[in-house]
Image: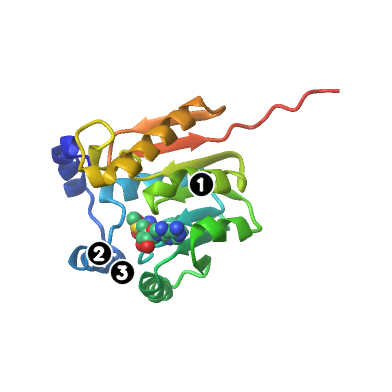
């Protein structure tokens, strides 16, 4: 979370009253075992976006224990949508399977493996891509998943401002990741389509794939 906005975020989080038992259980688990999941206000925004855009298919890169996946799969189910979600870590993948089962949702395709390889194998199209895995590979995740994105689709990139290290002093060990993320942001601003950078959560990037105009013959 961006430290500068900590108090504002705390205020927002206080206002959100979660009632779903499984979601509460997963939040408690993530806190106890230090599993990085989306912050509460980002979770709300994710749900808001997929709901208001009447999203069908979603691709998630970085399942962890299935928290954001379940939130999105619930919203898209009523639109006949499916969630594809990829996780590299075996233990987290297994925990996610248990949580997906408990959720009773039948529209989740959970993939175990490295998203750098797995995204390339997917034969489907998406309205929404959620990138939330190793930050050093955001550019590759973006380029691979963009190929599967429908016109009018959105790529949601979480943690893009990496604890604020992109604009303030950072520990030397993060130099490569910080440089990569900074280049990635420049690259997104320079591309066609629309990109917006939002300073909440840990920094959110939203990329909108415009519908290409076809020339009349
Ligand atoms: N989206 C989840 C949520 O909010 O509930 C949190 C995801 S967590 C921030 C990032 C996850 O991405 C970790 O569980 C990590 O093991 C996984 N990951 C990292 N690199 C990956 C890769 N190359 N392919 C697939 N998963 C990856």
Q: Give coordinates of residue 33: x percent, y percent.
A: 21, 68
Q: Give coordinates of residue 16: x percent, y percent.
A: 23, 50
Tell me which numbered mark, 1 or 2, is placed earlier along the sequence: 2
Q: Residue at x 52, y 60 (%)?
A: 84
* C-alpha gap between disc 1 and disc 2: 27 Å
Q: Is residue 189 above or below residue 108?
A: above
Q: Residue at x 75, y 28 (%)?
A: 214
The kind of secondary structure element at disc 2 is: helix
Q: Which marked residue is nearer to the observer: mark 3 or mark 1?
A: 1
Q: Is residue 117 above or below residue 196?
A: below
* C-alpha gap between disc 3 and disc 1: 33 Å
- Residue at the extreme left: 7
Q: Give coordinates of residue 74: x percent, y percent.
A: 44, 60
User: Which residue is label 1 attached to?
Assistant: 140
Q: Residue at x 27, y 45 (%)?
A: 174
Tell me which numbered mark, 3 or 1, is placed earlier along the sequence: 3
User: Which residue is label 2 attached to?
Assistant: 30
User: Which quadrant of the picture is home to ligand 1?
Assistant: bottom left
Q: Tell me if I can see residue 74 in this picture.
A: no
Left or right of 42? Residue 144 is right
Quarter occupied by residue 163: top left
User: Which residue is label 3 attached to?
Assistant: 22
Q: Tell me if I can see residue 212 in this picture.
A: yes
Tell me which numbered mark, 3 or 2, is placed earlier along the sequence: 3
Q: Which marked residue is nearer to the observer: mark 3 or mark 2?
A: 2
Asked if disc 2 is less than 8 Å from ligand 1, the answer is yes
Quick one: label 2, few (<14), some, or many (20+) residues within 10 Å? some
């Amino acid at each position: 979370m961006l430290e500068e906005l900590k108090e504002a975020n705390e205020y927002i989080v206080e206002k959100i009253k979660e009632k779903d038992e499984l979601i509460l259980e997963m939040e408690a688990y993530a806190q106890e075992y230090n599993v990085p999941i989306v912050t509460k206000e980002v979770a709300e925004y994710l749900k808001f976006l997929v709901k208001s855009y009447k999203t069908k298919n979603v691709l998630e890169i970085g399942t962890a224990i299935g928290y954001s996946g379940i939130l999105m799969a619930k919203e898209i189910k009523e639109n006949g949508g499916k969630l594809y979600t990829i996780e590299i870590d075996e233990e987290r993948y297994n925990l996610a399977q248990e949580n997906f089962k408990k959720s009773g949702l039948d529209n989740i395709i959970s993939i175990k493996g490295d998203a750098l390889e797995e995204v390339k194998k997917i034969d489907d199209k998406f309205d929404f891509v959620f990138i939330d895995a190793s930050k050093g590979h955001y550019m590759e995740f973006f380029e691979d998943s963009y190929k599967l994105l429908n016109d009018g689709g959105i790529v949601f990139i979480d943690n893009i401002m990496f604890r604020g290290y992109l604009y303030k002093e950072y520990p030397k060990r993060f130099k490569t990741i910080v440089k990569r993320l900074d280049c990635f942001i420049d690259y997104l601003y320079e591309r066609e389509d629309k990109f917006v950078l939002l300073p909440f959560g840990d920094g959110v990037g939203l990329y909108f794939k415009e519908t290409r105009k076809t020339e009349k013959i």
